[in-house]
Amino acid sequence: MGSFIPNTPEEQKEMLDVVGAKSFDDLFTDIPEDVKLRNGLDLPEGKSELETDREMKSLASMNKVYGSIFRGAGAYWHYIPAIVKEVTTNETFVTAYTPYQPEINQGVLQSIFEYQTMICELTGMDVSNASVYDGATAAAEAAHMCIDRKRKKMIISEAVDPKTIAVVETYCYGSGTELVKVPAKDGKTDLDALQAALDGSIAGVIFQQPDYYGILEPAREIIDMIHGAGAKAVMSVNPTTLGYLETPGELGADIAVGEGQPLGIDLAYGGPYLGFMAAVQKLERQLPGRIIGQTEDTEGKRSFVLTLQAREQHIRREKAGSNICSNQALCALAASVYMAAMGPDGMRETAVQCASKAHYLRDRLAEAGLRQKYDSEFFNEFVTVSETDTDAIMKALDAENILGGLPLGHGEILWCATEMNTKADIERAAAAVASVTGKEVTA
């Protein structure tokens, strides 16, 4: 932030004079003397800009940056158009905070409004909030949205990402909500077990499409089953798939949630990411966080404001469904710019390439000795199984500068392909696997 200038000693003295303090120490007179730090922090001496640059580059060189990635499991390697970072690194967005004052925050408010609009278009839902921390948090918040006075139990499919299940469990424990896990069968939700678990006490059901193993669930059948029991359907989705597959809105889901990282956000060692949430109109007031709305100012000009924000989040916490007061505005802006740059055709093309390359990868790995475990339709992730040592496979791929799929244990590997993987990458990966399995693959 090149234009940022910290306050000067003169300004600091002026501020101290205003509050009636002679020094900064006077501001901490209420803190016991025995807990104050007197000798300074045990930190190394400061370095020059050049020395700091050299040390940071030395540390960065220790990272392994793969030339090709075949791992997903919730975080995906996608192309990010240059305009995304060009816009999001603008200082007016980087330094912006919660837009409580609309008269000076029109730019940020509009960016969030546009994000909400695009999320609704992408998911086919009626209303979107201004984002939450990540996809797992979004699923947990959706569970709270379903609970009412008569129905206080939630169901989650064990075919959902384990990380998401863990977060939902934590939230439900904290709120006293009983969480029932329905097992997976052949890599997807066991419909018989789901039907048996549904009764008048169930408020909602969370399932994932595609699921954690990449398999396409019978989403419409699941949603009809949930609604037949009078419960709400929470559908966790990969946003990339929505350029090609039926949307949650088209399928009749009540709430759509997901991880927004595939929408123009770097893998970045796991964050910060973006949780999106959208719902049908009747659940608008149950959405956590805030909703930005469009209006007109006193001169009749288009403007934006905080339209809906439950004050109980701040002053009546014991009655709040959520205490989320912040949103991932900068990440949401990145998602907005990405979706605008890609457009409907670009989003669809990305989805098609992900699916087609994943199926080609599946075929080449099968030739290399790794068979697909589940005989089901999938999008861009799938599980293979073999008797070959998975550690040896990962090492062979690593030697080729390739990050292989995620080992799941018992000889299973969860693979992923995106538009970033070239045919040459897939051939190299298959050859590396074949070098371990002893199979021959055709050129």
Image (spheres, rainbow, N blue to C red):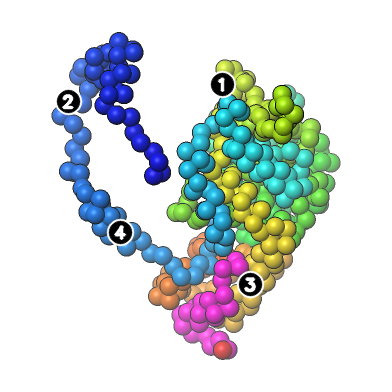
Relative placement, left or right, of 423 versus 12 is right
Q: What residue type is labelled 1?
A: His
Q: What residue type is labelled 3?
A: Lys
Q: In which quarter of the image is the C terminus?
A: bottom right
Calculate the distance from the C-alpha at mark 3 to the C-alpha at mark 1: 48 Å
User: Which label sits on residue 57?
Assistant: 4
Picture layout, residue 357 above or below residue 250:
below
Residue in the foreground of this view, choosing between 374 and 92: 92
Q: Give the range drawn in magenta.
A: 418-442
Residue under the image location 25 percent in, 50 percent down: 49
- Rendering coords of residue 6 (x, y %): 34, 33
Assess whether mark 1 and mark 3 are in contact (beta carbons under 8 angstroms): no
Near mark 2 (Cα within 10 A), the count class, few <14, some 14-19 or many ≥20, is few
Residue under the image location 68 percent in, 60 percent down: 347
Q: What residue type is labelled 2?
A: Arg
Query: Is disc 1 placed on a helix, strand or loop?
Result: helix
Residue 434 located within the stretch drawn in magenta: yes
The quarter of the displayed image where residue 76 is located? bottom right
Of marks 1 and 4, which one's residue comes earlier in the chain? 4
- Which residue position is annotated with label 1? 314
Picture layout, residue 224 above or below residue 216:
above
Calculate the distance from the C-alpha at mark 1 to the C-alpha at mark 4: 43 Å
Residue placed farthest to the front in the image? Answer: 299
Residue in the foreground of this view, choosing between 359 and 347: 347
- Which residue position is annotated with label 3? 357
Picture layout, residue 386 above or below residue 150:
below
Q: Nearer the viewer, mark 2 or mark 3?
A: 2
Calculate the distance from the C-alpha at mark 4 to the C-alpha at mark 3: 35 Å
| Main SS class of the magenta portion in the image | helix
Residue 368 in view here: yes
Assess whether mark 3 and mark 2 are in contact (beta carbons under 8 angstroms): no
- Which residue position is annotated with label 2? 38
